């Protein structure tokens, strides 16, 4: 399978406040590349968000803004690419709202949500949070809410599901983002 696993962390409850991004590239069922960057969200940090991910305003003071980072990242969002996230509704919304905030044109791509696949494939799991699914599947997740660790874990969840259930079982979960 070929796909990109994506994860964002936000500075505040608003979705247009991305403060970190990670992309884990999978080609032929192997993680081949990773991208991680802090992002200066040009907004105040909410203490609850900081409590979740541990990123403070001072940490991003020299980080690129999203428009500065987008030329590097946009190559991963094309109609032929599958972009995967755990709770993809959140991550796709962060991308959409951030692009809108900076008046950057959205790009169409395909998406799959490992939260949805996990609920379908593992209905008896106590919950379907990223860390719980990782624990149940024996996937290493060292720093939950670190975007790179989360995107890597998401990639490994999908690879595990592909090996356990087959690529055809995953196909019905793919949705277009326009």
Image (spheres, grey):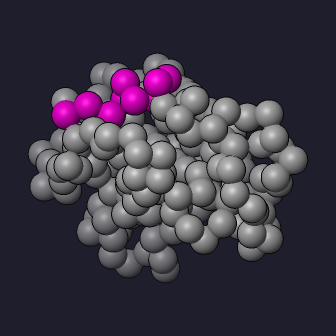
The x and y percentages for residue 155 are 44, 41
Residue at x-position 48% and y-position 31%: 70
* Extreme residue in the right direction: 58
Q: Quadrant of the N terminus?
A: top left
The image quarter containing residue 13 is: bottom right
Residue at x-position 32% and y-position 49%: 161
Range of the magenta residues?
71-79
Residue at x-position 49% and y-position 79%: 126
The x and y percentages for residue 149 are 62, 43
Against 146, residue 133 (above or below) is below
**Visible residue check, residue 52:** no
How many tags in the picture?
0
Residue at x-position 37% and y-position 24%: 75
Is residue 65 one of those drawn in magenta?
no
In the depicted view, which residue is nearer to us: 133 or 52?
52
The secondary structure making up most of the magenta span is: helix
Against 47, residue 130 (above or below) is above
The x and y percentages for residue 21 are 57, 42
Against 5, residue 178 (above or below) is below
The x and y percentages for residue 82 are 27, 38
In the rendered structure, the answer to whether residue 28 lies left or right of residue 149 reads left
In the depicted view, which residue is nearer to us: 45 or 100?
100
In the rendered structure, the answer to whether residue 27 lies left or right of residue 38 reads left
**Visible residue check, residue 40:** yes
């Amino acid at each position: 399978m070929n796909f990109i696993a994506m994860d964002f962390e936000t500075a505040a409850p608003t979705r247009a406040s991305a403060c970190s991004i990670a992309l884990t590239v999978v080609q032929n069922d192997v993680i081949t590349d990773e991208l991680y960057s802090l992002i200066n969200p040009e907004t105040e940090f909410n203490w609850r968000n900081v409590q979740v991910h541990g990123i403070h305003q001072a940490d991003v003071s020299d980080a690129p803004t999203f428009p500065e980072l987008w030329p590097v990242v946009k190559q991963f969002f094309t109609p032929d690419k599958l972009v995967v996230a755990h709770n993809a509704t959140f991550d796709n919304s962060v991308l959409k709202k951030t692009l809108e905030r900076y008046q950057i044109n959205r790009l169409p791509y395909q998406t799959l949500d490992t939260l949805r696949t996990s609920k379908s494939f593992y209905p008896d799991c106590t919950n379907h949070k990223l860390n719980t699914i990782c624990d149940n599947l024996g996937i290493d997740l060292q720093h939950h809410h670190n975007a790179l660790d989360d995107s890597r874990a998401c990639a490994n969840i999908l690879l595990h599901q592909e090996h356990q259930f087959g690529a055809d079982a995953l196909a019905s979960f793919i949705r277009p983002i326009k």
